[in-house]
Image (cartoon, rainbow, N blue to C red):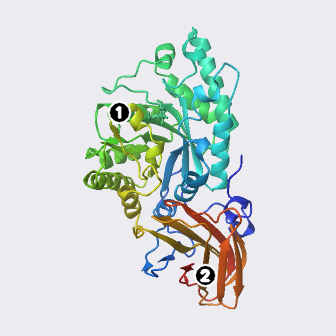
Amino acid sequence: MRSSRPATSPRSSRSPFTSSGRSSRPRLRARPAVLLAGAAVVGALLTAGAGTARAADAPLRDLAAAQGKAMGTAVTGSKLTGTYGDIAGREFSWLTPGNAMKWGSVEPAQGTFDWAEADRIVNFAEAHDQDVRGHTLVWHSQNPSWLTDGSWTPARLGTLLHDHIDTEVGRYKGRVAAWDVVNEPFNEDGTYRSTLWYDGLGADYIADALTWARAADPAARLYINDYNVEGVNAKSTALYDLVKSLKERGVPIDGVGLQAHLILGQVPSTLQQNIQRFADLGVDVAITELDVRMQLPSDSAKLARQAADYQAVMNACLAVTRCTGATVWGFADSDSWIPDTFPGQGAATPYDENYAPKPAYRAIAEALGGTTTEPPTGACTAAYSVTGQWNTGFTGQVRIACSGAALSSWKVGWNFGAGQQIAQAWNATCAQSGAAVTCSNASYNGTVPDGGSVTFGFNGSWSGSNPVPTVTLG
Ligand code: 9MR
């Protein structure tokens, strides 16, 4: 299934207006910080009725791109519509399937494959100009029972693993930017975890898996991913020693994933130092599964502490060039694994169950250099931003968001101050008379629920300057 975004969107259609290709956000290979191309994201935001001007709230992915980083989230494919889909597409530049690419999901019976949810996520990512982090090829958990219950000779087990990697990486060749090839290979004390793979094939199952993944898609970045390896400790040192020896042996390894399933108030003080030591080995580092859990119920003090924790993780990544970015393990509390696994705990993600951003969201944005404002209660707001600009043309968007209020239809208006002219709009009907532009909802997006948002876009022309107009929402 393709995106919910109509095909006229320049992001999905890759129209000539965006022929420079994918935007200025970073690819999964680490690179120095760059500024957003063109006009970057600037905006004006007015509260409905009240008319108070506010600073723009740029999406996290744009803020991250301006820092040379990416911001990602784990997603559930079946949820990628409505508000969940809007947020996933708008705020994040990486998507990780939370479960859809695990062996047990893709090959439930031997030789019988189900790629539906994985395909859905990859298609969504492509329609929203996002990279996919494939997760995960070799793990001790969420394997199909035919595999775990079978009795295999080492040779047969190796062939099964090789075929699995060939099949899955091959299927998404060129479409998955990075793979968590091996997941969670270590015990807490730094010894190898006893698993189907280690017990059957020995420690070189890791080198073999990486080599097979490289052969199946030479362009994909290959990672080893683990938890409790965020600070300097016995487990992260074992991972460090492994990566060092793999590099020395010429085994393909491009990065390490630090999962970062953290407990409130317990961000390791050695996080940045640890990221740096992996970077110094010549590999990328990604924060791959960030969440910060707390004892429920949450309260404002805990949420403030959590915000500081998120900010500390972002700051550590920002401080190291080879830290490519951070992925949250589910962006909303309603889509988090924590309550099921740690009874009584939760509220671990940056959005609450109703998709309202929490202090942690604002902390991430601020760490990434953004300014954020909390919308006043009981208001719908419209924010105008220029998302791309070239010689004589530009792409703009307006986001209408409601909090404590809702709309069943909408109309926004503005006056262009420098002769700009709208050429084409999507997700709205727009008309321009002289400088005055009015845009009203399309048949399918007049409803903006409490806690939800709608975005429409347009291409226009400009010359001389392209100032951001003041937008009114009526
Ligand atoms: O988020 C995943 C959850 O839905 C599954 O039930 C769980 C099963 O183990 O796996 C979760 O994701 C895990 C990830 O794949 C690897 N690191 C730990 C994550 C949380 O358990």
Q: Which residue lies at the image location 35% right of the left edge and 33% below the top edge?
A: 342
Secondary structure of the residue carrying numbered label 2: strand
> Which percent across, then down, holds residue 425?
71, 72
Badge 2: few (under 14), some or many (20 or more) residues near its Cα, within 10 Å? many
Q: Viewer-proximal residue, 402 or 115?
A: 402
**Relative side of 178 to 360, left or right:** right
Q: Viewer-proximal residue, 348 or 161?
A: 348
Q: Viewer-proximal residue, 430 or 406?
A: 406
Q: Can you tell which mark lies on residue 413?
A: 2
Q: Which residue lies at the image location 44% right of the left edge and 51% below the top edge?
A: 322
Q: CA distance from mark 2 to mark 1?
A: 49 Å
User: Does the residue tagged 2 have its C-beta within 8 Å of any atom of ligand 1?
Assistant: no
Secondary structure of the residue carrying numbered label 1: loop
Q: Is residue 164 visible?
A: yes
Q: Quadrant for residue 375, please give it.
A: bottom left
Q: Which residue lies at the image location 55% right of the left edge and 26% below the top edge?
A: 208
Q: Quadrant for residue 100, please give it.
A: top right
Find disc 1 in the rendering and name its residue.
Answer: 343
